[in-house]
Image: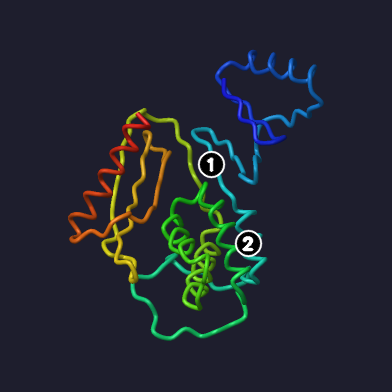
Amino acid sequence: MFLLVYVDDILITGNDNKAIFDLLQQLHIRFTMKHLGTANQFLGIHIKSLSDKYFLSQSAYALSLLQQTNLSNCNSLANPSFMKQPTQISADNTLPDATTYRSITGALQYLTITRPDIAHAVNTLSQHMHAPEQIHLYLLKRLLRYIKGTINYGLPIIKSSLTLRTFSDADWAGDPVTRKSTSGFCTFLGESIVSWIVKKQTTVSRSSTESEYRALAAATADTIWLK
C-alpha cells in the first residue's frame, strides 16, 4: 500500500482493497476527512483510468496558462523550440514584462510533471529568469504555441515488464555565452517513462564526444540509483 500526502490532499493506492478500506475507516475515526472515491484528479493532474493503462495529464492547467497570456486562440506550432535563432523579432505586448516571464516559466516547470517533451525548452527558459530579453519572451511564446497544439498530451502508465532502459543525449556547446553543453536523458520502466532530466553540464566539453560521455555517465548513475 502507498499513502501519498501533500498538505491536506491524500492519495491511497495498493493491491489489497480490504486493507485500503480498513485504513480509510481508521483515518475517518481520527480525522475529519472526505472520501472522494476513485482518484480522477490530484494536485491539478487528471488521472484517466483505462482498461490497460492510466493516463496522466494537465490539460486544464495548460489551458489556464494560455488564458493568462492571451494565447488561448493562437496558432499552434509543431516544435517547442528551434535550432537557428531568428535574426529579427517583432516586439508585442503579449508577454510584456519580466514578472510575467518569471511567473509563466515557473508555472511551466510544474507542467513538466506530465510533459517530458517540453523539459528541454523549459530548462532553456529557466536559465534567463534573472534578466529575460526579447528573444526569451519570443521563445516562451513559441513554447506556449506548441502547448496549444498539444494540449491533450500526457503521460501513459502502462502495465508491462520491469526492464529499465535509459536513453541519453547531449547538445554540444549549446549555450552561446558559456559554450557549455546540455545533458538530457530519460528512463523507461517497461513501456512507461519514469524519470527524465535536462541539465546544463558543469564544465565545457571540448568535443561532441566528450559531451556525450558526460551525459551518458550522468544517465548511468541515475539508472543505477533507480535500479
Q: Quadrant of the N terminus?
A: top right
Residue located at (29% from left, 48% from top): 168
Crowding at mark 1 (Cα within 10 Å: few <14, some 14-19, many 20+): some
Q: Position of residue 164 (x, y in %)?
A: 33, 33
Precedes in sequence: disc 1 or disc 2:
1
Residues under labels 1 and 2: Cα distance? 21 Å
Residue 3 image position (x, y, % from top left): 61, 25
Query: Which kind of residue does numbered mark 2 sit on?
Result: Leu
**Which mark, residue 65?**
2
Marks counted in the figure total 2
Establish if 103 lies above or below 190: below
Left/right of residue 83 with respect to residue 216 in the rendered view: right
SS class, disc 2: helix
State the residue at coordinates (60%, 57%). Answer: 62
Compared to residue 153, the image places residue 9 above or below, namely above
User: Residue 182: percent from the left, percent from the top?
Assistant: 33, 57
**Circle 1: residue type:** Phe
- Which residue is at 21% across, 49% downward? 213
Q: Nearer the viewer, residue 176 or 104?
A: 176
In which quadrant of the rendered image does the C terminus lie?
top left
Callout 2: few (<14), some (14-19), or many (20+) C-alpha neighbours within 10 Å? many
Where on the picture, by quarter, is residue 42?
top right
Which residue, given by chain and number where applicable, does mark 1 sit on? 55
What secondary structure is marked by label 1? strand
